Amino acid sequence: MNRINHGGDVEPVQARKIREWNSLDTALYDHFEKKLDVAIEKYGRSRMQSEVAKLRSQLREVEEKCVDVSIEISHVTIGEFTLVRSFR
């Protein structure tokens, strides 16, 4: 990790602190990623891929029927929050 959001360089001491601060997040992510992987293996990878493909297809159908692509979307970011507004 050598960059942060504003694009500036991160000093080695800062990078170490960031890794330390995020260690619990990383541990949680790793734990649940492994748990998901075990569940997928148990369910069957090819079966899961097939179900994901069906879901994506259904989502595309809903999007085509329900989303008005003529609406302009504006994203406004304030601090860590992003607000989404639509305009006609």
Image: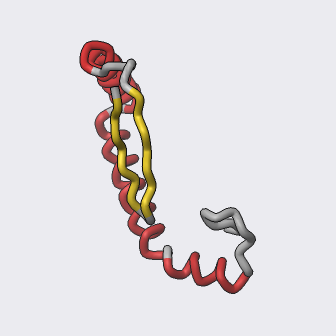
Q: What residue lies at 57% left-to-right and 77% top-to-bottom?
A: 18
Q: Is residue 47 visible to us here? A: no
- Residue 7 lies in quadrant: bottom right
49 sits left or right of 39 in the view: right
Q: How is the image coloured?
A: secondary structure
- Name the image quarter holding the N terminus: bottom right
- Residue 41 lies in quadrant: top left
Q: What residue lies at 69% left-to-right and 66% top-to-bottom?
A: 3
Q: Position of residue 64 (x, y in %)?
A: 32, 14
- Name the image quarter holding the C terminus: top left
- Residue 81 lies in quadrant: bottom left
Q: Judge by depth and name the residue closer to the eye, 71 or 67.
A: 71
- Asked if residue 54 is positioned above or below residue 13 in the image, the reply reads above
Q: Position of residue 2 (x, y in %)?
A: 71, 68
Q: Position of residue 71 (x, y in %)?
A: 36, 24
9 sits left or right of 59 in the view: right
Q: Residue furthest front?
A: 88
Q: Position of residue 60 (x, y in %)?
A: 34, 18
Q: Is residue 25 visible to us here? A: yes
